[in-house]
Image (cartoon, grey):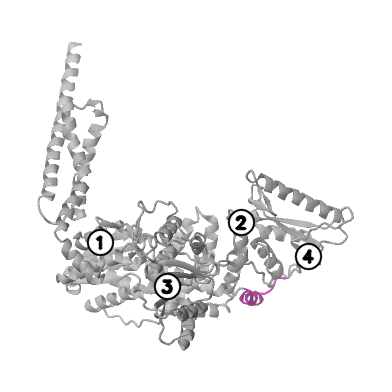
Amino acid sequence: MFSRISDYFKYKKQEKEEFIAVLDKLVQDITIAEQEFSSIFSHNNYIDVRIINNWKNKFSTLHDNASSYLAGGMIEKKKLPSKYEAQLKRIGTLYGLIDKRRKEHNKNLLSAGKAAAVDAFNKICPGYTPTEYQINAILADDKRILITGAPSTGKTTALIAKYEYLKSKGRSLLYFDALSNVKFADFSLELLSKSKESITYNRPEKNFLNKMIMQFIKEKLSDSIYRGRLIDYYFKFHTQGKTRFDFDRDEDYQKYILLCPPVTLKGEKVKSYEELEIADFLYCTGINYEYNAPFAKEAMINGARLRYKADFTLPDYGICINIYTMDDSGNAPFEEDGITSVDGLGNATAALNNRIEEIRNLHNDAEIPLIECYTYEKTAGNMLPRLQSALAKYNVNFNVKNDDEIIKLIQDTDKDFFSIITESIRLSMETILATGESEETILTLSRTKSKTSAPLYKRRERILSLVLPFYNYYIKNVEWDDFRIIHYAAKMLLNADKNLVDSMLNCQYLFVDNAESLNAASYQLLAAIVEKTNCKIVFAGCGWLSAVGINGTDPVYFQDFGRFFPGHDEILCDKTFNIPGGIYKQMMDFALNESGNYEYRPVYSKNTSIKTEMTNKTATDFLKQLLSDNTENPSILVACRYEHELEAINQTINEIRKDAPSCHISSSTILNASGKYNIVLWVSTRYTNFGFPDERICLNNISDLILRRPDTNFFLGERNLLCKAISLTKERFIFICDNTDVSDYIEEIIKNPV
């Protein structure tokens, strides 16, 4: 017994000694960490954020171990002696201080060079005083810097000032604007030439891809398989439209129907996209129908005809079809037939059910068969199969029109169909080429994602069936394009000998502006340059991003900047310039919508004198009046969203120049606009305007399939561009718009004037 007790104390003493030894070793290691911490700040050099991250990574295990012993003072029932508590806390204190110490160290260091930074800034922006963050951006000497912020916060100005500052010091620099994919391709060709790669590349004209797609579709109309896919897509997805359940208020739905009217292949305007689907089905299957025809005269109630018209009447069979706006839970939308629900959906639903019952009784009394369809059936995609089955029970004959007839009907009825398909294929192709994905990868991604989004999968499969045949045609007939040139150059750099890379790239700093518009190919090239050289990088980009930008852009790459360039220092710009505070605040609130994408609220510039106005005059009438009222001949920019709009704008400007040849009027897409103008006119305001964000294009585009995640704010990019347009203004910014036909994101602004 005594022996067992003795052994117990012996083992306990041994465990305690071992535990104390572990703690002593931790304290020794913490002392080493402190010494290295002190050495980081012992000189007057700029401290790169990566130095801090390296220190954190080196001692992360030590920090975790110390923290675990401090947690509750017990680890595996071993009590932590009190004398070790303060010593173990030292590593946590170092972790908490190191980022603050770095900022203070660098701030003190940069203050000595402030005068030089201000001089560099004033060379490109005379008469303006740079902000503290712009000075920091100019002087910061991190290996990797990201200058970011909302629109009009001085990111580009800081970037160019830093470029000029380093150029004056004799540094070798590379500068890219991410809006121009061509510049990346030209640089790639130059690299390949230096590496002795023999590539013959004649760049096609600017809009060759659109023309190529249109020609491809035209040729494929004679191919029964591809033609059938187009027809299938048209009926099942292109014309599916929104239902009342997609809106919070009936007035919003009515506006949508007014500005995006559902028009049948017979040329009739119907009241809903549910009715459109049924009307086109009946027409294409050769079933004669009358839309909203008066009910049979024989049907009498109390000696007077009921004020009722069936949605569709089939006169050859004496059958009626009605569509009821009801979801799969049996609820009506918030408003139905002018009856507003007071307590949720109850009243509207009750009113709808009463109406349905009245109509059923009427048909029973008149002995006229009635087929009932519901909105939820359309949403689920089974409305037409159920309708077809019901019609077959009444022995209705189906005389389906041939594909040639249907294609001609589609072309005559929906002028935008082929344009939208062309644009969708172009967007999809650019994304595929930019990411460098193969056909097999895309199909695999589609099938993988289908597990969680079946309805979207069906749409995606249909659009893929239109995109992939063109993709194969394109790869077969186009040997090189800008995207593949960039990919090839990036691969060459990664595989090249370092000495060869050094001989090709004499670069100390790499600058990239508008980084939110970088695509996957450009990122791959830049990452290869940084990996194979010792050059430092400076990016500037806006945090307001659209789903997919120009040239196959995936703005998620910008959001995940640290994934591609780890250990970067972010300089956050938080003061807006050139944009009136009121309108900017509205746009920011609508754009961010409390999404958490931004953790700060920019300071608004209070001294801007820009007036924002709205007119429902045409651009021609407004410009004529503007020039006749103004004797100073101001500089004017007519700004738009897409290039296809420029042709009509330039015709307007040429017409005005006949009477005012000396007027200073320019036109540009906002992506390509630069400089400052006394007056800027924004003309991209219509609710529906092909090329402007069109839900059908966005839904057709398969970019969300091969990009990592979709954007959460649909019109974010449009607001970003509108902010840029306003920032080009010196005095007046004018919306040219009809406020009965205005896009959602413009309406947000003009409905709440500031």
Q: Earlier in the sequence, mark 3 or mark 2?
A: 2
Per the rendering, the mark at residue 379 is 2
Q: Nearer the viewer, residue 527 or 445?
A: 527
Vertical placement of residue 12 versus 197, above or below: above
Marks 3,1: beta carbons within 8 A: no
Residue placed under numbered mark 1 in the picture: 134
Mark 3 to mark 1 CA distance (whole Å): 27 Å
Identify the amino acid type marked 1. Gln
Query: Magenta region: which residues?
Result: 399-413
Identify the amino acid type marked 3. Val
Identify the amino acid type marked 4. Ala
Mark 1 to mark 2 CA distance (whole Å): 52 Å
Q: Earlier in the sequence, mark 1 or mark 2?
A: 1
Q: Is residue 497 left or right of residue 681?
A: left
Per the rendering, the mark at residue 680 is 3
Q: Nearer the viewer, mark 3 or mark 1?
A: 3
